[in-house]
Amino acid sequence: MSSRAFEAKAVTQGPKHHFFGYYGICPWDATGRYLLCLESDFHERAPGAHDRAMVGLVELANGRFEPLAETGAWNLQQGCMLHWLPTAPDRLITYNDRQGDRHVAVVLDINTGKKRVLPRPISGLTRDGRRAVSLNYARLKSLRPVVGYAGLPDLFAEQNHPEDDGIYLMDTETGEADVLVSYEEARALLRDDPDAQTHKLWFNHTVINRDDTRVVFVVRWNEPGIEIKHTVLVSASLKGGDLRILTDLGASHFDWQSARTLIGWVTMKEGENWYRIDEPSGEYELLRPDVLTRNGHNSFTRDGTWMLTDTGPDENNLQSLMLWNMEEERLVHLGQFASPPPFRGEIRCDMHPRWSRDERQVCFDSVHEGTRQVYVMDVSAAVAP
């Protein structure tokens, strides 16, 4: 099927910039009427401590942006980790913010304007919405600025492997939060790696599986002048403990295809490529390296049949959007979009494609028309049975 069959429609407009941020999170509300996103006055530099972005809704029928709240905890790659809260996806949203001397998550009722504040920012939600995982975004700002939040110091900056910091598990009703996986636990897990014992560790990309029992994430460390020296892909029980190394050779992006199966762009002994990993056993298989040749941000339909992914800019400064049918091993090209050279590094615009709730549309962020905007594409012609 030709990519010309798929039209990308801008659902936000300039001169201000609009973007959702990360992938694998649904921006559509339960009715399909609204799309959640951020609005900013600039996108040619990283946000500083005093920069604010507007959280709002796009009414898809007319493209109108409705502002809801401001946030001081955001970046151009992940936004402020916007979510529709699964306990009430027709009216409750969550977003990260900076209030006083801490990063928090705000739960906002879009109908009443009522807010409640959770004591930690959210980096991922369970499918039922009752628990969230959380990261220290001040640590990320100092070690991986592209996904951190400016404005607060890392309280554990002097510690390479703090026992009281890492991935937290938080109750989204009560706000009760405890360390689920500490940096010290990660150090102990990686006891055979000398670098892990002596370098300052940081976690990122926490993704909870489909039955809310486990979380997968990356453990990383840097060297002077090297933003990411090494990455280890690890999983843990949401009850605590039971840490498993899925690969210690490197990992980039990934998502759960099922409750136990993970697919990602990772490095195994055969090299760097797309692999399917059976998380309980650690067994893996290489996907089609002759077709799936480039890294991307992948996510799946609920039945695990279709993988949606993108690529970074190629030698012609074009980013690609595509679908891969896991059963038929069939690739569908959805389109290519310009990514001008100035937008690299911390201000790049990864497409970060995301599924709609009915899995007939996808949306993505792009700068191919000059400003950073959100686009929606109907893919029902490809994925409909």
Image (tube, grey):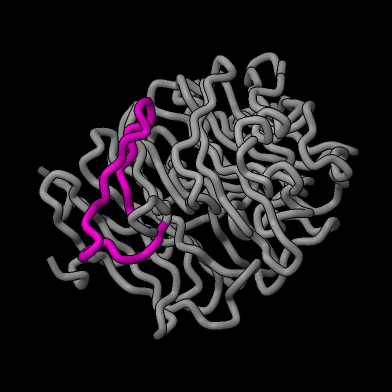
Residue that appears at 54% across and 45% down:
232
| Left or right side of 365 for 181 | right
Q: Quadrant of the C terminus?
A: top left
Does 359 sit left or right of 219 as displayed? Answer: left
- 241 and 33: which is toward the camera: 241
Quadrant of residue 230 within the rendered picture: bottom right
Comparing 246 with 11, the one in front is 246
> Magenta segment range?
273-296
Q: Position of residue 2 (x, y in %)?
A: 15, 70
Q: Is residue 360 above or below residue 89?
A: below
In the rendered image, which quarter contains the N terminus?
bottom left
In magenta stretch: residue 290:
yes
Does 198 appear in magenta? no
What secondary structure is the stretch in magenta mostly built from? loop
| Residue drawn 59% across the image and 58% down it | 77
User: Residue 55: in sight, yes or no?
Assistant: yes
Whether 122 is drawn above or below 268: the answer is: above
Residue 290 location, quadrant = bottom left
User: Residue 360 at x, y = what percent?
Assistant: 25, 47
Residue at x 23%, y 66% (from the top left corner): 333
330 sits to left or right of 309: left
Q: On the picture, is 358 further left or further right than 223?
A: left
The residue at 48%/62% (across/down) is 365
Classify 346 as above or below 110.
Answer: below
